[in-house]
Image (tube, helix red, strand yellow):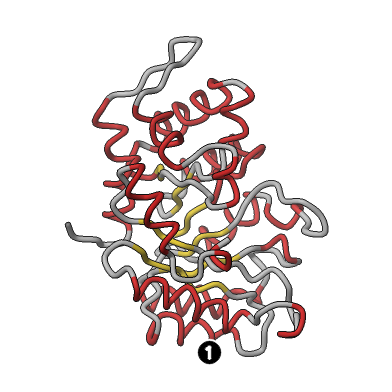
Amino acid sequence: ELLSDRSGDKLVAKMDEAGIDKAIILPLDFWLGCPPSEGISIEEKNAVYAEAVKSHAGRLMTHVGVDPRRENALEIMRKGVEEFGAVGLKLHPTAGFYPDDPVCEPLYRKALEYDIPVLIHSGNEPAPLRIKFSQPKYIDTVAAQFPDLKIIIAHTGHGWWNEAVDLASVKPNVYVDFAGWQMEYLNGADYFYQPLRFAIDTLGPWRVLFGTDGSMLDVLFSPRDWLLAHKEYQSPSGISFAGEELDIVLGQAAARLYGLKD
């Protein structure tokens, strides 16, 4: 994680090697009530990420991460956006809450005020985290309740990818990203290309986003190799992508979603 690269220098070096212009980093709030003696607090973690962004202005951006059950969750979010310049909110339900729990609603309303996307983890995680909280159907209820809220289903729900794309097909405020699909690709290229093709066909490329889930998964696939798996794809069954589609997925869609300029 970024804590092994507090300055962001290693990340930017990998981006340079891969030809990646910009990256969004995501502080994760896994452990509610974790005292600083057992690891840095979420307030400190958000500050570390913000300093990395400051050190690499124009290359790195960050979300603000917070567990909505924290008493000071709104203040953490406010500070992240207003003081640290966070461009989105990151929620990780596998810590023990459902995305449609009323405790999340103040954060969603604040995200609407700030006009920033909310990226919600969906899919597998190792113990002691619990994936039942991250099934896409609980994100669907949020999209219905807040139709103007821009929501990204992280990892396209992994094993629930069909459900994630299905709900996004009728909720135009929902996007999906394919961060963290390196393992599926390594198990067989079409385990990745077929869901990616289906998502683009169903949602259009403007609601499908590229991601790496680095640095954890960099040990499987460097960012450069993961990018090449998209740009120089080789599908055993002949699945194909138009160059224009890949350009959108690999950057243009995120640039539009986050309001980025060249």
Q: Is residue 214 left or right of residue 53?
A: right
**Of residues 10 and 189, the one drawn nearer to the viewer in this rendering:** 10
What is the x, y in percent for residue 173?
Answer: 41, 55
**Of residues 22 and 149, the one drawn nearer to the viewer in this rendering:** 22
Identify the residue at image location x=41%, y=49%.
14
Q: Which secondary structure lies at badge 1? A: helix
Seen in the picture, residue 107 relative to 59 is either above or below; the reply is: below
For the C terminus, which image quadrant? bottom left
What is the x, y in percent for residue 105?
Answer: 57, 75
Q: Which quadrant holds residue 112?
A: bottom left
**Of residues 153 and 21, the one drawn nearer to the viewer in this rendering:** 21
For the N terminus, which image quadrant? bottom right
Identify the residue at image location x=27%, y=54%.
256
Tell me the residue that label 1 is attached to: 75
**Of residues 69 and 166, the one drawn nearer to the viewer in this rendering:** 69
Q: Which quadrant holds residue 167?
A: top right
Q: Which quadrant holds residue 91?
A: bottom right
Few, some or many C-alpha atoms within 10 Å of disc 1 (few <14, some 14-19, many ≥20)?
A: some
Seen in the picture, residue 126 relative to 4 is either above or below; the reply is: above
Identify the residue at image location x=29%, y=70%.
57
Instruction: Please identify the residue farthest to the top as the structure is shown.
Output: 237
Q: Is residue 221 left or right of residue 158?
A: left
Q: Residue type at mark 1: give it.
A: Glu
Seen in the picture, residue 56 relative to 40 is either above or below; the reply is: above
Identify the residue at image location x=40%, y=22%.
233
Q: Is residue 11 left or right of residue 191?
A: left
Count of numbered circles in the view: 1
Instruction: Please identify the residue farthest to the left as the structure is shown.
Output: 262
What is the x, y in percent for residue 259?
Answer: 26, 62
What is the x, y in percent for residue 194?
Answer: 51, 23
